[in-house]
Image (cartoon, rainbow, N blue to C red):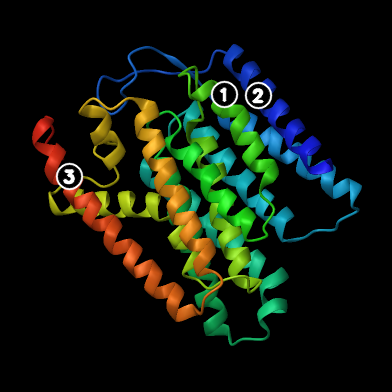
Amino acid sequence: MTVLIEAGAAFAISLLVCFLVMLSGARDMPDGGRKDHVRPVATGGGIGIATGHLALLYWQSSAQSAGFDVITLSALVAMLFLVIGLIDDLRPISARTKLVLLLLASIAGCAAGWFLFGSKLLGTTGALLSLGLILGGALWVFVLANATNFMDGANGVALGSGAVMLAAYGVLGLPVCLLIAAIAGFLVLNLTGRLFAGDAGALYVGVWVAALGLIGVVEGRFSIWVPPLIALPFLADVILTVVWRARRGGNVLQAHNVHAYQLLRRVGWGHMKAAALWWAMSAVCGLVAVWAAGQTAPVQALVFVCGAFLASAGWIWQRRTYSPRVTSADA
């Protein structure tokens, strides 16, 4: 019962703060290109998600007299990403500067996590291996946080799918209920097209999806193959789209509208239909990942490779099927 009450409180706080954000006057303006909305829409919903989530995390920590742990560190890193995203939402910075800031934040967070917690769980390692683990973890956080942000171009796709991915981690024993509830509070307004999360919200949720994967691996709950399997609906679209644009001479740092979900939107799919597809794919990957977590590491690796092959094949089929129907140098 306590969990339900806390989740309900996170939902209510998130929804309330999201309403307040809408009253603040912050708006995402249409640009006639990458952004497909035709009128200004309130933005900054990520503040509501973070407030609802962090308020209840603090409540839990105080009630349990918990000290500084890996969840607290993850919250600090997520807040740093939130601030960087919020700065970009309010006064856009260059893509290169933003990526550098996010990379530095990823490295700092993973370095702190390794020296405070990781080395105690995995034992003493050499300096070179420690550096490799830190940089590998930082790359994972950086890629997945940005992938979540790149997928946040249609109502419900990024944050709704993120909630489904978090649910898979919940089944595997990681603490996700409060964040899922906070995301749900935001989705009440987002799915009706009244509020966007902004970069701040997408980055905040993306960091948590990445961090929980790292925590599960370090704690020995599953191998390194399970987190990318859970996040495959994001990773496949983002990585393949970046490769596609690079091969065609596009500027990979420039905003665009040629992700798979955006291509579906441009051929007539509604926001909910596109979101439902990504929720379904996230649910399938999550269920397979939960099953795979109970298997040996080689089996988990094989499952991921098969999943990546199927996702890539689906992406290529979709691109070849729908690209001829739209007008774009990149599509």
Left or right for 284, reference 329 = right
Crowding at mark 3 (Cα within 10 Å: few <14, some 14-19, many 20+)? some
The residue that label 3 is drawn on is: 319
Q: Residue at x 35, y 33 (%)?
A: 274
Circle 3: element type: helix
**In x, y percent, where is residue 204?**
57, 43
Q: Label for residue 15? A: 2
- The numbered mark, 2 or 3, whose residue comes first in the sequence reads 2
Which amino acid does the dot numbered 1 rest on? Val
- The numbered mark, 1 or 3, whose residue comes first in the sequence reads 1
Which amino acid does the dot numbered 2 rest on? Leu
Q: Residue at x 18, y 51 (%)?
A: 316
- The numbered mark, 1 or 2, whose residue comes first in the sequence reads 2
Q: Nearer the viewer, residue 186 or 122?
A: 186
The answer to whether the residues at label 1 and label 3 have Cβ atoms under 8 Å apart is no
Q: How far separated are the C-alphas under marks 1 and 2?
A: 8 Å
Is residue 98 visible in the rendered image? The answer is no
The residue that label 1 is drawn on is: 188
Crowding at mark 1 (Cα within 10 Å: few <14, some 14-19, many 20+)? some
- Judge whether 165 appears above or below 295 on screen: above
The answer to whether the residues at label 1 and label 2 have Cβ atoms under 8 Å apart is yes
Q: How far separated are the C-alphas under marks 2 and 3?
A: 37 Å
Total marks shown come to 3
